[in-house]
């Protein structure tokens, strides 16, 4: 396995020398890919030991730590008070630590944006994802959150261990009264532990993490890390003052006419025209997730390989899925879909011609892909309110319930990312926002700002030419291509030695920041 993810809470579990494996393992919240309890404990104890050892030699120890093993490089950080995440990358060579840190932080930031903080997920006794209230017996015992349950469970297991040790010592004593009482106490503790285990929030938290981390990393394609992963941002649209003015006016007037709309970002062919009032960091996280979500749908091999893992908010594989953030061919060119045969220069030339000639066909199909996005990824101009896809977003730095939702509106080549109030009614949003966008002159100005010249065909994908003699690669059609280029595709146009130099340059720049 190329990547590993480990999440743990330092206040859970037990550090007693006599603690059982079950007590020590309680600190582990999530591990991917799945391993045995002993193997997970070995990794956890290694990471904790390295951090404890390195902290002794630093007056102000950092929360980011790296461990380079023979075939695995671990980068781990305290992302929340008491909560740690480790990202492991299987490699036989040294991996740029700054790239590892960037991928780790972006991964956690994306998870927090979509699901909230990990500590808050443990604290919440009842929430949208869980829909489970704590049993009355636990509430009567003073346990009001999932974290309270885990702390009580750790205490209960410690009492069980000490009671079992006491029974072992006195089981052969002449006075059997104490042994009988201890046996009854152990039975009560076991029953109480079973109740606590049934109410533990960890399995539900693991289900949420299991539906995010593996799919996120698989679609991000971090098998071969390079500086392009750390520089992967939102591609800007070509500078056009009229188009940018239309986007700014659209965002301002939409927020004025529909108060439920908090932010509005405009894209042209998947490229950013105006972020409106969106926070740049938050918008980049939202954009990356939407691009990976679309990629998950248009590349069937990723969905069929692990079909049970693909659940909302990800999209199931759909060959008819209309891609708006990048063309399907671009995802294939990026190496995310293995070629069926060795591609010759003639095949590349034929693919480029067919890709260009199909642009007119794409324009006709794009006309049908307009309106609000539904949960299945399709766009519908007459969407029913209950079919509207609303993605909860956790913007607040404090751990509170989501107060904003994301909805997507598309009318080729324009795409709008709308951040709306979570309490806003879907029927009102569809009616008010839809009616405004249908009659707004700024939408027409935005979509018609850069019409293609007569007789000029725009290639729908980039492609790579490999010189078999010099082993050099060259990326074609990037200037004509409208849409983002995946990091692996961009990295492939650099010779290996030049790419290594770029990694070193970025490493040096980060060292001085």
Image (cartoon, rainbow, N blue to C red):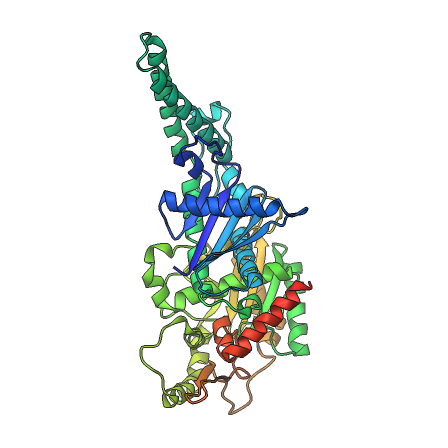
Q: Nearer the viewer, residue 341 or 511?
A: 511
User: Quick one: quadrant of the N terminus?
Assistant: bottom left
The quadrant holding residue 271 is: bottom right
Q: Is residue 487 above or below residue 109?
A: below
- Residue located 64% across and 70% down the image: 247
Q: Residue furthest bottom?
A: 455
The percent coordinates of residue 267 (x first, y second) are: 57, 70
Is 231 situated left or right of 210 in this image? right
Vertical arrangement, residue 26 with respect to residue 70, above or below: above
The residue at 36%/48% (across/down) is 35
In this rendering, position of residue 260 left or right of residue 191: right
Q: Position of residue 211 (x, y in %)?
A: 42, 53
**Residue 161 seen in render:** yes
In the rendered image, residue 18, in percent from the top left (x then y), is placed at: 43, 30
Q: Confirm whether residue 431 shows in the render.
A: no
Number of numbered labels in the structure image: 0
Quarter that holds the C terminus:
bottom right
Relative depth, front residue between 286 and 421: 286
Residue 241's place in the image compared with 409, above or below, is below
Q: Is residue 270 above or below residue 164?
A: below
Tell me: 439 left or right of 488: right
Left or right of residue 271, residue 337 in this image:
left
Quarter holding residue 414:
bottom right
């Amino acid at each position: 396995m190329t990547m590993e993810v480990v999440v743990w809470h330092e206040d859970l579990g037990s550090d007693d020398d006599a603690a059982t494996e079950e007590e020590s393992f309680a600190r582990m919240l999530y591990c991917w890919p799945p391993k045995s309890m002993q193997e997970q404990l070995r990794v956890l104890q290694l990471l904790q030991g390295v951090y404890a050892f390195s902290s002794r030699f630093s007056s102000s120890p950092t929360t980011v730590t790296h461990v380079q093993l023979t075939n695995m490089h671990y980068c781990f950080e305290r992302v929340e008070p008491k909560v740690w995440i480790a990202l492991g990358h299987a490699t036989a060579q040294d991996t740029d630590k700054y790239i590892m840190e960037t991928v780790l932080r972006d991964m956690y930031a994306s998870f927090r944006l979509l699901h909230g903080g990990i500590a808050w997920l443990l604290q919440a006794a009842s929430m949208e994802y869980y829909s489970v209230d704590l049993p009355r017996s636990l509430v009567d015992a003073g346990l009001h959150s999932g974290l309270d349950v885990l702390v009580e469970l750790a205490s209960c297991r410690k009492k069980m261990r000490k009671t079992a040790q006491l029974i072992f010592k006195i089981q052969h004593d002449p006075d059997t009264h104490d042994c009988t009482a201890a046996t009854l106490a152990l039975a009560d503790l076991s029953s109480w532990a079973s109740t606590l285990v049934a109410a533990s929030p960890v399995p539900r938290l693991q289900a949420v993490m299991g539906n995010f981390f593996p799919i996120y990393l698989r679609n991000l394609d971090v098998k071969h890390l390079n500086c392009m992963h750390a520089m992967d941002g939102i591609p800007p649209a070509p500078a056009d003052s009229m188009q940018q003015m239309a986007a700014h006016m659209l965002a301002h007037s939409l927020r004025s006419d529909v108060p439920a709309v908090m932010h509005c970002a405009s894209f042209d062919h998947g490229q950013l025209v105006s972020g409106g009032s969106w926070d740049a960091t938050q918008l980049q996280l939202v954009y990356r997730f939407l691009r990976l979500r679309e990629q998950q749908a248009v590349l069937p091999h990723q969905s069929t390989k692990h079909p049970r893992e693909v659940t909302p908010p990800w999209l199931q594989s759909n060959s008819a899925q209309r891609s708006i953030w990048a063309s399907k061919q671009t995802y294939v060119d990026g190496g995310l879909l293995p070629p069926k045969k060795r591609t010759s220069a003639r095949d590349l030339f034929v693919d480029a011609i067919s890709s260009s000639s199909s642009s007119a066909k794409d324009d006709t199909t794009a006309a049908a892909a307009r309106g609000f996005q539904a949960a299945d990824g399709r766009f519908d101009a007459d969407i029913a309110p209950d079919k509207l896809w609303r993605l909860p977003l956790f913007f607040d730095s404090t751990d509170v319930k989501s107060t904003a939702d994301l909805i997507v509106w598309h009318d080729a080549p324009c795409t709008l990312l709308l951040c709306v109030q979570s309490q806003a009614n879907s029927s009102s949003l569809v009616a008010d926002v839809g009616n405004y966008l249908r009659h707004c002159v700024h939408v027409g100005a935005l979509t018609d700002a850069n019409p293609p010249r007569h007789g000029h065909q725009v290639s729908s994908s980039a492609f790579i030419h490999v010189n078999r003699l010099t082993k050099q690669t060259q990326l074609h059609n990037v200037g004509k291509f409208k849409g983002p280029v995946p990091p692996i595709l961009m990295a492939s146009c650099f010779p290996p030695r030049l790419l290594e130099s770029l990694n070193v340059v970025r490493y040096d720049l980060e060292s001085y920041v």
